[in-house]
Amino acid sequence: MKAEATLSVNGVVYPVELEPGTSLLAAVRDVVGLTGAKEGCDDSECGACMMLLDGKPVNSCSYLALQAEGSEVTTVEGLADGDDLSALQTAFLEHGGVQCGFCTPGMLISATHLLEANPGPSADDVRIALSGNLCRCTGYDGIVKAVLAVADAG
Ligand code: FES
Ligand code: FES
């Protein structure tokens, strides 16, 4: 039986009806209609589904949507300002941090959280912070360079 709830995503409150077992990823993609976060493993392994929940990264495939009621959810769509990409989004494009793009939403969420927590990370800090996000395409170097470039630019 579905339950009525509200989800606050990227600053917008959405009334939703959800089965108790609906994941946050399914709720945001299929009910709210924001498809930036991706379903990869559906098992907390790949990070493609990552979102910020009250500023902290979570694998939304493994988080119940109803538990997110009362919290602020940020998806990759919320990192841009309308059509203006964030500095990190632009740097990913400039430094070869995006190839197929499947991992990119989760990478950007993790990297955004890292730079908020540690504005001056080392390359090792970046690699550790992104260790929960798997990429099959880039070899990670472009992604690390992009995050360091944004950190260097302040
Ligand atoms: S889809 Fe959630 S961690 Fe892979
Ligand atoms: S760019 Fe393809 S998985 Fe990362």
Image: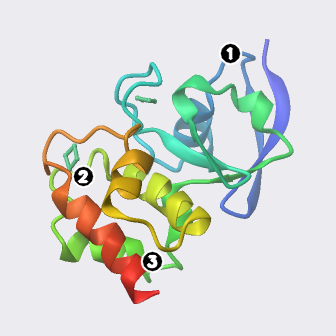
Q: Are marks 2 and 1 in contact (CB under 8 Å)?
A: no
Q: Which mark is residue 21?
A: 1
Question: Looking at the image, which residue is at 78% across and 30% down?
Answer: 67
Check mark 2 vs ligand 2: CB closer than 8 Å? yes or no.
yes
Check mark 3 vs ligand 2: CB closer than 8 Å? yes or no.
no
Helix, strand or loop for disc 2: loop
68 or 121, nearer to the observer:
121
- Mark closer to the chain start, 2 or 1: 1
Between disc 1 and disc 3, the foreground one is 3
Helix, strand or loop for disc 1: loop
* Mark 3–mark 2 distance (CA, rounded to whole Å): 16 Å
How crowded pointer 1 is (Cα within 10 Å; few <14, some 14-19, many 20+) is rated as few
Residue at label 3? 86
The image quadrant that residue 10 belongs to is bottom right
Q: Is residue 41 left or right of residue 70?
A: left
Q: Quadrant of the N terminus?
A: top right
Residue 2: x, y in percent? 78, 19
